[in-house]
Amino acid sequence: MDQPPPRQAVIHRLRYLWTFELFDSFFLPAVVALSLRWTGRPLGPIFWGGALLCSWLLWQGAAYWYLKLRAVRAREPFPTKLLPVYAALRRVSWALLALAPLAWLATALLGAPPRLGLDGVVGFLLYLLAVLEQINYYHWQLMYDNRADLAYLRGHRRLKRGAIARELASRGG
């Protein structure tokens, strides 16, 4: 039977998760943008769309892990009143992720094709990262970076439900 990790380990993990999600939401797009600008390349709509969507998803994760940390510290469950917010964010994020490629396609069809230079490739990669984060939070956990998660994966031979997905499912969100 799996033993839950000690409370202090959970607090440490949650602190790590929220701070790095928030840090990455600014750092990743900024480093890429500065690197591309350093080479003299303009940043087009594909880059900005991918960067904004990636940050949007990372902000949701950072907020969730922060709120989860507060709940664990207070020895309380995740605030039920926020579950409808996360249920709405799940839908809004899928809509935004679906609209981005349609916007890029519409731009191309209207005669202003998006640049497919390095900024476009990087923007598309950031977009794919946003899709993966959406899946990771709201559907299936994709990141297995600790012993407990790896043991779960070996023992169950399937992916865990995403953290926010579990929260929503367990309390009717």
Image (cartoon, rainbow, N blue to C red):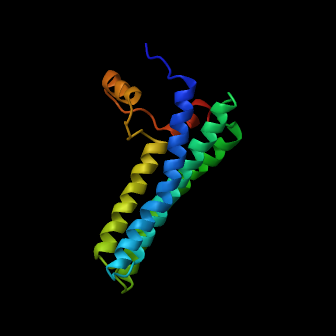
Nearer to me, 27 or 88: 27
- The quadrant in which residue 68 appears is top right
Q: Point out the image quarter for the N terminus.
A: top left
| Residue occupying image coordinates x 57% and y 52% | 89
Nearer to me, 61 or 33: 33
Task: Give the residue furthest to the top.
Answer: 1
Q: Is residue 54 above or below residue 169?
A: below
Residue 153 visible here? yes
Nearer to me, 29 or 95: 29
| Residue occupying image coordinates x 53% and y 48% | 19
- Apparent side of residue 98 relative to residue 71 in the rendered image (left or right): left
- Apparent side of residue 146 relative to residue 7 in the rendered image (left or right): left
Q: Is residue 4 above or below residue 68?
A: above
| Residue occupying image coordinates x 71% and y 41% | 81
Residue 103, position in %: x, y?
A: 43, 72
Q: Is residue 11 above or below residue 121?
A: above
- Apparent side of residue 135 relative to residue 116 in the rendered image (left or right): right
- The quadrant in which residue 80 appears is top right
Residue 50 visible here? no
Q: Point out the image quarter for the C terminus.
A: top right
Residue 109, position in %: x, y?
A: 36, 81
Residue 158, position in %: x, y?
A: 34, 30
Task: Give the residue furthest to the bottom.
Answer: 111
Q: Is residue 84 above or below residue 48?
A: above
